[in-house]
Amino acid sequence: MHDYSIDSNERLQIPLYLAIVSILFMGSVQATLNFYHLVLPWWIDGVSVFGFYGFLLLLFDKYLWKWRFLRTLNVVHTPNLNGTYEGNLLSSYSEFKKEIPISVEVVQNWTKISIVWKTKTSCSRSLVASMLTQTEPNILTYQYLNEPNQNAPEALHMHRGTATTDIEKDQTLSGGCYNNRDGKTTVTFNLKKVN
């Protein structure tokens, strides 16, 4: 998985919210300990806020960002693309005449993503990515490295490319990509989420 950028300011705001929650929580723990006349060693007291903040940030990055509740409150704008998508692509290499079945696996957390395309003859993996969430539909753009399988035609060789994907509300992804294989090859695709 690799980092991805996003046009929302949530990555500035949410760490601040988590820091405030950490300070308040650890303040209430300290008040409870004081009430019962318990004293923590100085080395635990000094790292407790930072430790709890780190735990909350990790928890948010892995799980909490997916909560619909936070989307309803308009706190999180990052689309959750986790899952497997299937569909077809058309390539200018075959003059857009031959549909090629494709499967795409997206693994994502709040700050990292991995996009893997698989066809019968090759596999592509994302290298860098960015999301636009202030547009309708949301847009995912990423660069990828395509590596042919051993059974691939001789004309297909390793290449890099860029894909731009519309993220529809009905869990479909559609768009196009281009690469530097033998000049300029363009591809269009439509994918539906299957799980």
Image (cartoon, grey):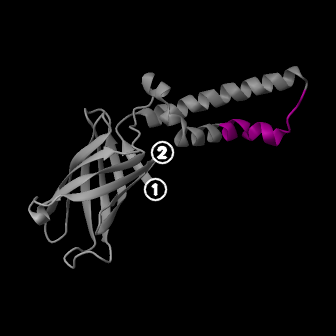
Cα–Cα span, label 1 and label 2: 9 Å
Q: Residue at x 30, y 34 (%)?
A: 170
- Residue on which the image places disc 1: 1
Displayed quadrant of residue 49: top right
* Badge 1: residue crowd in 10 Å (few <14, some 14–19, many ≥20): some
- Residue 38 in percent (x, y) is at 89, 28
Q: Residue at x 34, y 54 (%)?
A: 104
As rendered, which of 195 and 169 lies closer to the eye? Answer: 195
| Highlighted magenta segment, given as a residue range | 38-52
67 in the magenta segment: no
Residue 24 is marked as none
Q: Is the residue 7 above or below the residue 1 in the image?
A: above
Q: CB under 8 Å between callouts 1 and 2?
A: yes
- Residue 165 in percent (x, y) is at 26, 46
- SS type, badge 1: loop
49 in the magenta segment: yes
Q: Which residue is the extreme one toward the right? A: 37
Q: Residue at x 61, y 37 (%)?
A: 56
- Residue 147 in percent (x, y) is at 32, 70
Task: Point out the image quarter for the C terminus.
Answer: top left
Displayed quadrant of residue 168: top left
Please name the amino acid that badge 2 sits on: Asn
As rendered, which of 148 and 34 lies closer to the eye? Answer: 148
As rendered, which of 154 and 125 lies closer to the eye? Answer: 154
Of the numbered discs 1 and 2, the one sitting upstream in the chain is 1
As rendered, which of 8 and 120 lies closer to the eye? Answer: 120
Q: Main secondary structure of the magenta part?
A: helix
- Residue 138 in percent (x, y) is at 29, 37
Displayed quadrant of residue 172: top left
- Residue on which the image places disc 2: 109
